[in-house]
Image (tube, coloured by chain):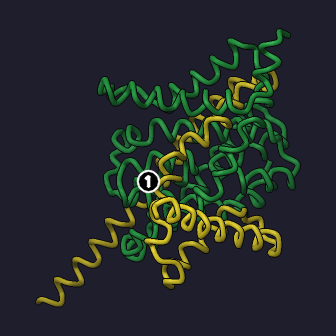
Amino acid sequence: MKFLRYAQQFSVILTISMLGEILHAVLPLPVPTSIYGMLLMLLALCTHVVRMEWIKDASDFLLKIMPVMFLPSAARFAAFWPQIQALLVPLTVISVGVTLVTFAATGWTAQLMIWMDRKGKGRKSDDCTN
Amino acid sequence: MTALTEFLNGSSYTLLAVTFGSYFLCTYVQMRFHLKHYNAYLGSIILVVAFLALFKLDYDKYYSATQAITMLLTPATVCLAVPLYQQLSALKENWKAVIGGIVAGIVATMGAVLVLCIAFGLTHAQYVGLLPKSVTLAISLGIVQELGGDVTLLISSLIITGTLGNIFAPMLCRLMHITEPVAKGVATGATSHAMGTVTALEMGPVEGAMSSLSVAVAGILSVTGVSVFANFY
């Protein structure tokens, strides 16, 4: 029965991907199939249209081998070498430098807002006890 | 071109075996010898590129021969909803911080790209190609093509950014004193898209969930950001 479970689970995941593909084709927004699919899957799980045990094993498998899926793109980078050679310095500085800027801006802002929120809530609960 | 090169260039299964094999080998070595400061992912990229270079194979042909794995990216991204669903309470509690962090990240990124492009005297097309360098390719490719940006630069900077996040996200969190799991996940996902999310999933369940969500939210919000910033230079 185990093989059947995987077939069933992949069917559910691929059906959601298909619905994402349909939305991508129909709606005039620059949102790709995968993002529509992810939001649809979240919605389906929240509304219990899809139950966790219907997708769990196949989903774990796909997420576990996800790094391998990026290897072809990463290796293809070497193919761009002749074209980007002339721009190597600006490309490296911008790619590395801006990555640090994005990471810091996002992480620090989110962390600060979490702490402020927690402080606010803490004070509120103190007021209640007083 | 030798007969061997010619055969390997078209052999999907050799190339798929090399791709999976490199990843397996590098991960196994890391686990077997408990190597803390060695990155299996970077190791497998180097192994694959070395194999292609050794047999003088064509990178574009390698890419099309391994389409079978790349195609799985869409269903895998759909499955990112699973860790997100499991951490829904963390999202409900922190959604303001998630959105705030992502918006701050987009503005800072595009501002920094603008300043550096002016400093290096790059062209408008190159500037537009670099703007969405943190946005998942499926979204950024469309915008850049529409605005007439440099696609080669987009893909190059996107791969560098993703790979950096994939390798260094835990170290960056430590160096920048980002300790909140939600903030760690948002920073990783909003910076290095799905490539970084793979690492965020290893960092912890909350990190993985928030990173998955950030890829989607940052991607969608960046569309507006790029359209606005493209007019500045």
Quadrant in the picture for residue B160: top right
The correct choice, above or below, for B120 with respect to B143 in the image is: above
Mark 1: secondary structure = helix
Identify the chain drawn in yellow: A
Q: Quadrant of the N terminus of chain B?
A: top right
Residue at the extreme left of the image, as rendered: A130
Q: Is residue A46 left or right of residue B58?
A: left
Can residue B213 be seen? no
The one of B182 and B55 positioned closer to us in this rendering: B55
Q: x, y (%) of residue B87? A: 39, 69
Residue at figure coordinates x 57%, y 36% from the top left = A97
Quadrant in the picture for residue A28: bottom right
Q: Amino acid at mark 1?
A: Gly
Numbered circles on residues, count:
1
Q: x, y (%) of residue B15? A: 68, 29
Quickly name the residue at label 1: A107
Residue at figure coordinates x 81%, y 55% from the top left = B231
Q: x, y (%) of residue B59? A: 76, 27
Q: Is residue A88 left or right of residue A13?
A: right
Residue at the extreme top of the image, as rendered: B2
The correct choice, above or below, for A43 with respect to A21 in the image is: below
Can residue A106 be seen? yes
